[in-house]
Amino acid sequence: MAKAALFTAKQIGLCPDCGSELVMRSGQHGPFLGCSAYPQCGYIRSLKPQADGHVVKVLEGQLCPECQSTLVLRQGRYGMFIGCGNYPTCGHIEAMDKPDETAFSCPQCREGKLMQRTSRFGRTFYACDRYPACRFALNSKPVAGVCEHCQFPLLIEKQTTHGVKLFCADKHCAKPVSIKENHE
């Protein structure tokens, strides 16, 4: 295939740098607009949607606790969040969904509580609410119990090919724990 055939495209507008026509092209990271005078002019603009923190909605009646400006709903790189309308002067932000607190205290620091959180990829994990002072985190659901091997005060529940099994929550042990049923 000839190289000229790869660059034939519909003209979109004028290049802001040199005034030549812009053409739509496809590259390694998806479609983009490029200057038709390439390589003399290297202007390009991505056609991917940008998550730049743009304002989606103004939240009337809700004020920023730091500067008393109106709060706004924004779309960012990791999803929706609430932020101050006076950004970048005021950098106050709030998460959309507050983390769910579990009934378990943190086995590492023994001061915090484990909170159910969602990662930027949408996966659920459990972490100490004293982060960054305590960095204890689990990727599996915590279960009350004591490890019979190392006496760690927390177990985790994992789905295996043989069904649901309990394991020690200590990353250094991580051994399977037998499920003792109470027969009364």
Image: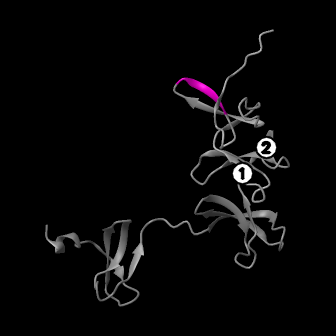
> Element under label 2?
loop
Q: Which residues are magenta?
A: 162-167
- Would residue 64 be found to the left or right of residue 24 on screen? right
| Residue 14 vertical placement versus 50 (above, below) | below
How would you rate the neighbour count of disc 2 (Cα within 10 Å): few for under 14, some for 14-19, many for 20 or more?
Answer: some
Disc assigned to residue 107: 2
- Would residue 163 be found to the left or right of residue 70 on screen? left
- Seen from the viewer's position, the closer of residues 6 and 118 is 118
Q: Please, which residue is most extreme toward the left here?
A: 1
Q: Is residue 166 magenta?
A: yes
- Seen from the viewer's position, the closer of residues 57 and 94 is 94
| Residue 67 vertical placement versus 75 (above, below) | below
Query: Looking at the image, what colour scheme do you see?
Result: one colour
- Residue shown at the point (75%, 59%) measured from the top left: 132
**Label 2 is placed on what type of residue?**
Pro
Q: Please, which residue is most extreme toward the front here?
A: 149
- Residue shown at the point (34%, 66%) measured from the top left: 28
- Residue shown at the point (63%, 33%) measured from the top left: 175
Disc assigned to residue 97: 1
- Residue shown at the point (78%, 69%) measured from the top left: 70
Label 2 or label 1, whichever lies nearer to me, is: 2
**Label 1 is placed on what type of residue?**
Asp
Q: Is residue 10 magenta?
A: no
